[in-house]
């Protein structure tokens, strides 16, 4: 396979181990909300705005890069494992997702 063909293939078929940004960020925010609810019984209002902001950015069902319902559930369930495996990366991803949503206008 030529180098050009390999590059085109990489663009068309992204790494399945790396979920699309909106999917990953929504999973992070959902995990953050679940943790807050578990720990305190309350979830801060801005969390819901950030969640909605990322939900609106998910690829449409069936679109290239969109996860299936099963893949999305698996990603959501994997968040605690991701956190345990590399807490620093997990926190950095979450912070990046929250910052991007805030900078993008998620908060009224």
Image (cartoon, helix red, strand yellow):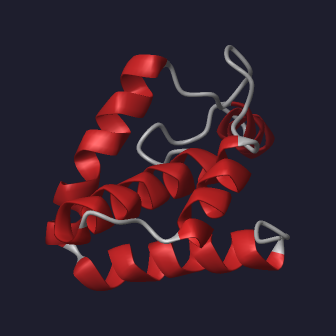
Q: Is residue 77 left or right of residue 62?
A: left
| Foreground residue among 96 and 19 | 96
Which residue is depicted at the point 58% across and 58% down? 48
Do we see residue 20 in this rendering? no
> What residue is rendered at 56% in x and 44% in y?
23
Height in image: 94 above or below 28? Answer: below
Above or below, 20 against 65 in this view is below
Q: Residue at x 24, y 79 (%)?
A: 87
Q: Is residue 68 left or right of residue 60?
A: left
Farthest residue to the top: give it. Answer: 62
Numbered-mark total: 0
Question: Front-most of 9 and 33?
Answer: 33
Which quarter of the figure has residue 12?
A: top right
The residue depicted at 61 percent of the width and 70 percent of the height is: 46
Q: Pick the quarter of the image with the N terminus.
A: top right
Q: Which quadrant would residue 17 be assigned to in this image?
A: top left
Q: Nearer the viewer, residue 33 or 78?
A: 33
The quadrant of the picture occupied by the C terminus is: bottom right
**Residue 100, horizontal then vertical, whole percent:** 71, 74
- Picture coordinates of residue 13, whole percent (x, y): 63, 31
Looking at the image, is 56 positioned above or below residue 37? above
Left or right: where does residue 35 sit relative to residue 92? left
Report x, y in % for residue 28: 43, 59
């Amino acid at each position: 396979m030529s180098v050009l063909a390999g590059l085109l293939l990489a663009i068309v078929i992204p790494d399945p181990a790396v979920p699309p940004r909106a999917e990953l960020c929504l999973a992070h925010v959902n995990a953050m909300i679940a943790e807050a609810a578990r720990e305190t019984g309350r979830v801060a209002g801005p969390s819901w705005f950030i969640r909605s902001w990322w939900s609106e950015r998910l690829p449409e069902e069936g679109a290239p890069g969109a996860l299936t319902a099963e893949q999305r559930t698996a990603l959501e369930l994997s968040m605690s494992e991701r956190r345990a495996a590399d807490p620093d990366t997990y926190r950095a991803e979450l912070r990046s997702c929250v910052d991007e949503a805030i900078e993008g206008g998620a908060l009224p």
